Amino acid sequence: EDYIDAQTDHVDIYNFLVHGDSTVKLSFNPGYSSSELALRKAAARHVLQDDALSALMNGHVKARLGSIPANVTWGGQSDAVFLAQDVDFMKDVIADVDNLLSSGVKVVIYSGQLDVICATQGTLAWMDKLNWKGLSGFKAAKRTPVYATTAHQKTNLTDAFVQEYDNMIFYWILNAGHMVPKDNGDMALKMLNLVIGS
């Protein structure tokens, strides 16, 4: 991440069309081990804070739901949670996905095309390593366009592609990076509705 940041005028690893000043300009305790320093630096970079979203969730949405206690506040991401999950960071889950698929569980995978850190080509590469009996059928399945809105469909403005076979579905989301709902909210909502069947 530091290399990409230094070599690319601070291209955002979550959406490569975004760049500018590096957001990780923090000082860290000099007593941290090199592995702890790397993890804390990753947390500082990946734990996104969005004041507008926090205001919306803790204001209008909380009021509309009416059931959230006053002492409970919404937070986008927590560095404490990020740090506690370090044992799962960058962990190979191919065997886990294989087990889910073999058990008949519906598996939905999606990737924003502008994401550097979880690049679509990388997602396709790990999917290609699955041992699932339906993989050849999935690979042979046609990738079809998805339109987030009727207006987009009328103008052939493709928002995503979907490829599915049996109980595995893959959405290749266009005009979106790591934060698909933020970058292409209409398509994120369309995908959610397609997944839950409404």
Image (tube, rainbow, N blue to C red):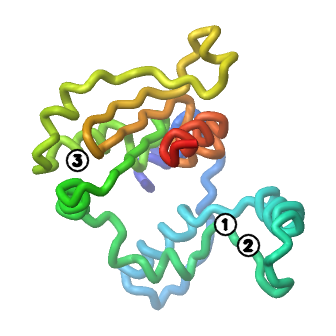
Near mark 1 (Cα within 10 A), the count class, few <14, some 14-19 or many ≥20, is few
Query: Can the viewer see residue 10?
Result: no
Residue at screen point 57% across, 69% down? 44
- Specify the quadrant that holds the C terminus: top right
Image location of residue 89, percent across then percent down: 36, 69
Q: Which residue is mark 3?
A: 126
Near mark 3 (Cα within 10 A), the count class, few <14, some 14-19 or many ≥20, is few
Q: Is residue 118 left or right of residue 157?
A: left
Residue at screen point 17% across, 32% down? 137
Image location of residue 36, percent across then percent down: 41, 81
**Image disc number at residue 74:** 2
Image location of residue 93, percent across then percent down: 25, 62
- Marks 1/2: CA–CA distance: 7 Å
Find numbered disc 3 in the image and state the secondary structure of the residue it sits on: helix
Q: Are marks 1 and 2 in contact (CB under 8 Å)?
A: yes
Which amino acid lies under the numbered mark 1 shown in the image of this protein? Gly
Q: Is residue 148 left or right of residue 63?
A: left
Q: Is residue 51 above or below residue 41?
A: above
Q: Is residue 121 above or below residue 4?
A: above
- Marks 2/3: CA–CA distance: 33 Å
Residue 27, quarter of the rendered image: bottom right
Total marks shown come to: 3
Image location of residue 170, percent across then percent down: 36, 39
